[in-house]
Image (cartoon, grey):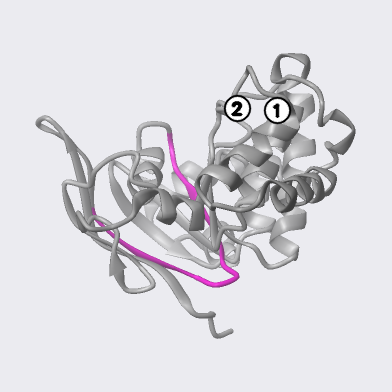
Amino acid sequence: MSRGEEILKISHLSKSFGNHEVLKDIDFEVCKGDVVSIIGASGSGKSTMLRCVNLLEEPSGGQILFHGQDITDPKMNVPAYRAKVGMVFQSFNLFNNMTVLDNCIVGQVKVAKKKKEEAHENAIHYLRKVGMESFMNAKPRQLSGGQKQRVAIARALAMEPEVLLFDEPTSALDPQMVGEVLTVMEELAREGLTMLVVTHEMAFARDVSSHVIYMSDGVIEEEGSPDQIFAAPRSEKTKEFLSRFRKTSV
């Protein structure tokens, strides 16, 4: 199957914190309509890589191209870029002093420069999409973790991004709340949203992704289709990492 238009291209990306090299020579691309899942043990560099793509961390070397433009160029308009490449965090990052609705409006008005009326309509549309419209006047403290994460997804969607980055979006949730967030993500994938997902949810990576990247010790150890990675991994490290999951899901 041919992939769509290339949106992001990561070339020779590296990141060090002092003498500690966290990412080494990372290469991959994200095309329109892709759902790319990044899996690997804790400490393998997955979240750091995602934070580099969103410029929350400054890469130490290499390039990140967005439609061919290097995002590390000092002339890059970072807020405008982040509006197009949105991010959903594991800790939600909602504004606790604002209602759910205002959380979904503020970025549209301040960053995307939308009129308040349009931003309001947009926010309600995406809250409805994630099943949170009836909570639009609530404050985040009144919500469960799963509800907060669905609001965070609606907030990111309201910016109408080209790509949505998910940094372990279910890892801070109680087990019974994981499903409600994954259901929303699966629906977005079916609708063709381009997604780059760091996840420990192996069933999501296997069943929903179009492409899977397995990271280990700061490098891409193996990548390919979900079938290839989960059914016929080539690397011993990939086999070892997946062995527990594969035993429990035969």
Q: In this view, does 216 lie to the left or right of 227?
A: left
Marks 1, 2: nearer the viewer: 2
- Secondary element under disc 2, as helix, strand or loop, is loop
**x, y percent for residue 38:** 48, 50
Q: Is mark 1 on a helix, strand or loop?
A: helix
Residue 118: x and y, percent?
72, 53
Q: In this view, does 60 lie above or below 89?
A: below
Judging depth in this view, the residue of 27 and 121 nearest the camera is 121
Which residue: 48% across, 60% down?
A: 233
Point 37% across, 42% down: residue: 51
Q: What stretch of residues is rendered in magenta?
A: 25-41
Looking at the rendered image, the quarter that the N terminus falls into is bottom right
Closer to us: 165 or 127:
127
180 relative position to 60: left or right: right
Q: Residues within 10 Å of mark 2 (few under 14, many from 20)?
A: many
| Labels 1 and 2: the sequence-earlier one | 2
Q: What residue type is labelled 1?
A: Lys
> Which residue is the extreme one toward the left?
19
Up/down of 169 relative to 231, above or below: above
The amino acid marked with disc number 2 is Leu
Decide: is 2 above or below 46.
below
Residue linked to disc 1: 148
| Residue nearest the viewer, comparing 239 with 57 | 57
Are discs 1 and 2 less than 8 Å apart at CB?
yes
Instruction: Identify residue for label 2.
Output: 94
Horizontally, is 183 left or right of 173 in the view? right
The part of the image, by quadrant, that contains residue 248 is top right
Q: Is residue 149 visible?
A: no
Q: Is residue 186 visible?
A: yes
Most extreme residue toward the top, as rendered?
141
Residue furthest toward the right?
A: 134
